[in-house]
Amino acid sequence: MQTHYGWMIGTVVLVASAVAAHGGPPASVGTVSGKVTYTGTPPKMKPIDMAKEPNCAKEHAAAPVLTENVVTGPGNSLRWVVVYISAGDQGSTPGTETVRLDQKACQYIPHVLVVQPNQPLDIYNDDPHSHNIHPLAKVNPEWNRSQPAGAPPIHTKWELPEFIPVKCNVHPWMHGWHMVLNTSHYAVTGEDGSFSLSGLPAGKYTVTAWQEQFGTQTQDVTISGTESKTVDFVFKARPY
Amino acid sequence: MRPHTRWMAVASGWGVLLFAAGVTRAVAQESHIGSVTGHAPAGRPLYERYCAGCHGDDGDARGENAQWIDPRPRDFTMAVFKCRSTPTGTLPTDEDLFNAMTRGFVTTNMPPWVALTPQGRADMVAYIKTFSPKWKTGKPGTPITIPPEPAPSIESIRHGRELFQKMECWKCHGPTGHGDGPSAATLTDNKDLPIHPYDFSSGSRFMCGVTNRDLYKIFMTGLDGTPMPSFADDIKPAEAWDLVHFLRTLQPLDTPEAAIWKAWLASHARELKPIGPEGGGGGR
């Protein structure tokens, strides 16, 4: 679990430093931050039976992995929610840092990743067996490539904005998302459901929060000068 | 020209004009197969006559017969095609579509359309390409290079068997190629519908042709839209022929590969390690 955080913090730092390094944004920039939570009863995540891949079953012998389509935390927080500027975006910088996806013990790490169009994406197989990576893209080209144990990483990228579900056909429980966003102002919520979008020049913005099962929500926010605005999202959870 | 013939000529002339005006999305859509050039407007009536019943008037696989068909007809609006000579994630060439249409898809409801003229098939290829904007924004991929096939040998077959183990083909196709590997039961296509891996023991033709070259292309380009991935990143062209030679031995056919394999097995069967989770290296 630590690796998830490491990756996400790394991304946030990289994006922040990328924004700072390009020197584009004006002196006074604002921040939108908040928390994503749910009301109601979320579905129970089910333990995944990996018996068909003994390597992976062994890795998770102590604690079976749960499905990740609705991951909740303390205080009704929601994890793996992508929050981003969907309209009025300014001061965005192109994504140049390479984003890494790992296939480890039959899981995608991270479960949800964000890239910008044409941002380099490297896909690694850390397992002692094969995977096939099958992004079910509709706007971008759908492809399907095998990656045996020890194979070099697949260097790829997505050209067009799209929310792409990704799966491995050999291990049907493996499911992840490649979120291709036309902005560098984005965040993926961690276990506490919090997010922060910084470096926003004065202006009117639409902030969108996307959760893979509950869909999207939007809120408008106006930033004037150096200020921090709080925007919280509450998804209505249903147990099915 | 007799009067009523002239009248018909005028009427059909108007018909062609009106028809052309209606086909806005088909403007300037062509296909090129060898020396034959196909035109989308000419392909439309053929498509509506022969294809729309399953593939739908809009190419969205919602024809009136579609609900009864398994596997479902191709959805041309997605522009994702199984049988290509081009790498995974790229559009097929006109010739790929033409060949698929001509050949049909064995084990599905898609018959061979060889009875239509080459010109008619080329016209339909052009028309099929009007259903997705991807044909306007993108170009077909560059066909993969296939080196000449070396003669099958026992070394080649045995190395192919190692690849079958190492690339984990058996996880779906099964240790003996019966299409019964551990992941076979859970396979779904890109529309989340169940799909079966090819059963080599059925002896039926492959999805994308009958030759060794066709077989080579299947695993080096992948069957896009299905669970079958491309192995082009992992299998070198020379090795790919080894895998082709081994796969031929899994079929209950009198192929040259099967003859070599049987002759070798007669005296070496004990040397073989099993394929599957316990298999180490396919017999070496």
Image: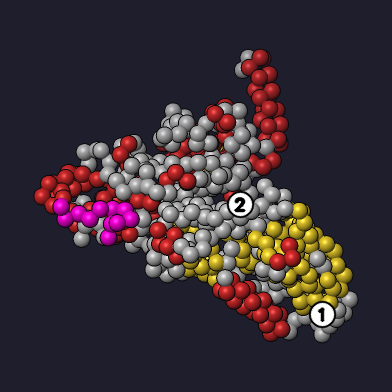
Judge whether B108 appears above or below A166 on screen. Answer: above
Residue of label 1: A29
Q: If you read the primary sequence from the N terminus, does the residue marked by circle 2 or circle 1 appear first? A: 1
Judge whether A119 appears above or below B215 on screen. Answer: below
Instruction: Report the residue at 33% width, 42% height from top.
Output: B178
**Viewer-side residue, B121 vs A136:** A136
Residue A178, image quadrant: bottom right
**Marks 2/1: CA distance?**
36 Å
**Viewer-side residue, A122 vs B150:** A122
Instruction: Report the residue at 28% width, 41% height from top.
Output: B251
Q: Residue A73 placed where, x, y %?
A: 68, 65
Instruction: Report the residue at 38% width, 51% height from top.
Output: B171
- Badge 1 element: strand
Instruction: Report the residue at 63% width, 17% height from top.
Output: B5
Q: Residue B186 placed where, x, y %?
A: 47, 46
Q: What range of the chain is rendered magenta?
A: B270-280
Residue of label 2: A138
Same chain for labels 2 and 1? Say yes or no. yes
Q: Which residue lies furthest to the front in this view?
A: A62
* Residue A60 visible here: yes
Residue B231, image quadrant: bottom left
* Residue B230 visible here: no
Q: Is residue B275 magenta?
A: yes
Judge whether B72 appears above or below A60 on screen. Answer: above
Q: Read off the chain for label 2.
A: A
Q: Amino acid type of disc 2?
A: Lys
Disc number for residue A55: none
Q: Horizontal placement of A234 versus B279: left or right?
A: right
Q: Read off the chain for label 1.
A: A
Q: Nearer the viewer, mark 2 or mark 1?
A: 1
